[in-house]
Amino acid sequence: MDFSKGKPEKDKTPNSEFFSLFGKGFILGSADVIPGVSGGTMALILGIYKRLLDAIRSVDSTAIKQLFRLRLSSFFESVHWKFGLILFAGIFSALLFFTRVVPLPVFMYTHPELIYGLFFGLILGSVFLLVKDLPNFSPIVFISIGAGTLAGFWVVTLVPTDTPDHPLFLFFTGSLSITALVLPGISGSFILLILRKYDTILGSIGQLGTAQTIDALFILVPFGFGVVFGLAAFARVLSWLLRKYYLPTLCILIGFMAGSLYILWPFQDREFTESYRSQTVAVNSPIASLAENSSPTDRAPDYLILGDIVNPDAPESEQLVEVITVKNKLVSSKPFLPGFNRNVLKKDDRLTDGLKSVIQGFSMLTAGLGIILLIGFLSRKKFIKPESKE
């Protein structure tokens, strides 16, 4: 799987592979949405890992020069555009599905025990499988895992719960999270969770095509540039580290994931604060209609408030109204271990719905653990076609 030497193979993607490759892209996109399931791991299981690496490597300095010189035929001949276009169409479709049809960013507020329980189980299972597959348990393994665990815990307790939406930080977030696409065992969504940008990015994707499209683009454009930069730079660097120092690098990644489970435990005493942003829009605009039907809640990433008409003396068709966007931002999160006493849990305001929340949290934790172990089982039994050795 070394892609740091030699030239990538030519793109041999036939038209007949469209639906198969699109489906694999959808699976990769689903893995990128769900923290704990690595896109790189799924690419390995689905037999397209080497082709993915070759596609990334094909966009090199020579190809970029051809593009800027408008030598488009040479550019498309050297770049694996067909493979990349079909695969990323599938990935983007999955992202839209899990933000518009099944809105995970919203569920993280409305059903936190259920969603975080699933995430915790997925990552716990990933750590177990990665440790199980280690070739040996030498001192360097224990030291690397220990160092990674301490680093992971330190990062998740150091990173503020309210990270900024500044374009530079969004660029950095995109650069770092996309590396998971080429690193089996670490999830891009997991990185977004650590950097407190999971609901921000997925929520913005879900806003595309709505009245809040412009706001979403202010988030997604710098993030997208970071993704491109990360694929071109960080992915190569990290893959080089895995080639040169495979075992200690992998062990540090395993420890990092284990240490970060602290913030994913489904039962947390979470404290939120509200931030406000005001804008003036036409009284009959789509966003004004959304605000009119929105209701204040701390069980959503954000909500709208319809304010006063700015120019009440103007004709109705020219009237403007104030719309206030209220964002619920997490300011502190401390894990706790719930009991099973129905009367006590009913009064525990740290839980969404008393005993029901506890049952949901542990049930989804078990489900997440089972899913990732099943993926590991399938990959070992080769029920999914192994990667071609062309």
Image (cartoon, rainbow, N blue to C red):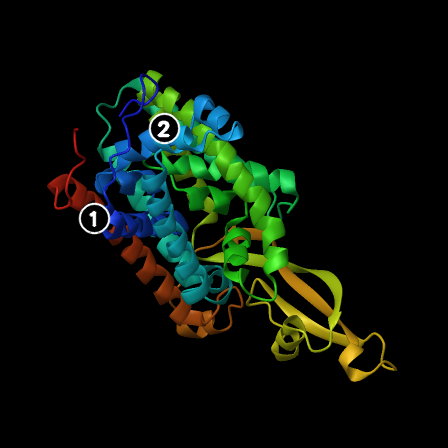
Name the residue that disc number 1 marks. Answer: 16
Q: Point out residue 4 in the picture as x, y percentages from the top left corner.
A: 35, 19
- Callout 2: few (<14), some (14-19), or many (20+) C-alpha neighbours within 10 Å? many
Q: Quadrant of the N terminus?
A: top left
Q: In this rendering, would 385 be left or right of 34?
A: left
Residue 382's image quarter? Answer: top left
Tag on residue 40?
A: none
Depth check: give the residue in front, 37 or 20.
20
Depth check: give the residue in front, 160 or 168.
168
Three-letter code for the amino acid on which mark 1 is drawn:
Ser
| Residue 369, placed above or below residue 78 | below
Name the residue that disc number 2 marks. Answer: 78
Q: Point out residue 344 in the picture as x, y percentages from the top left corner.
A: 46, 70
Residue at point 54% right, 37% down?
A: 226
Q: Could you say whether the residue bearing mark 1 is in a helix, strand or loop?
A: helix
- Mark found first going from the N terminus, 1 or 2: 1
Depth check: give the residue in front, 272 or 35.
35
Three-letter code for the amino acid on which mark 2 is drawn:
Ser
Q: In this rendering, would 175 be left or right of 30?
A: right
Q: Is residue 327 visible?
A: yes
Measure how far apart labels 1 and 2 are at the Cα level.
21 Å
Residue 312's image quarter? Answer: bottom right
Residue at point 40% right, 37% down?
A: 180
Q: Is residue 233 visible?
A: no
Q: Could you say whether the residue bearing mark 2 is in a helix, strand or loop?
A: helix
Q: Point out residue 130 in the picture as x, y percentages from the top left corner.
A: 27, 35
Residue at point 43% right, 34% down?
A: 179
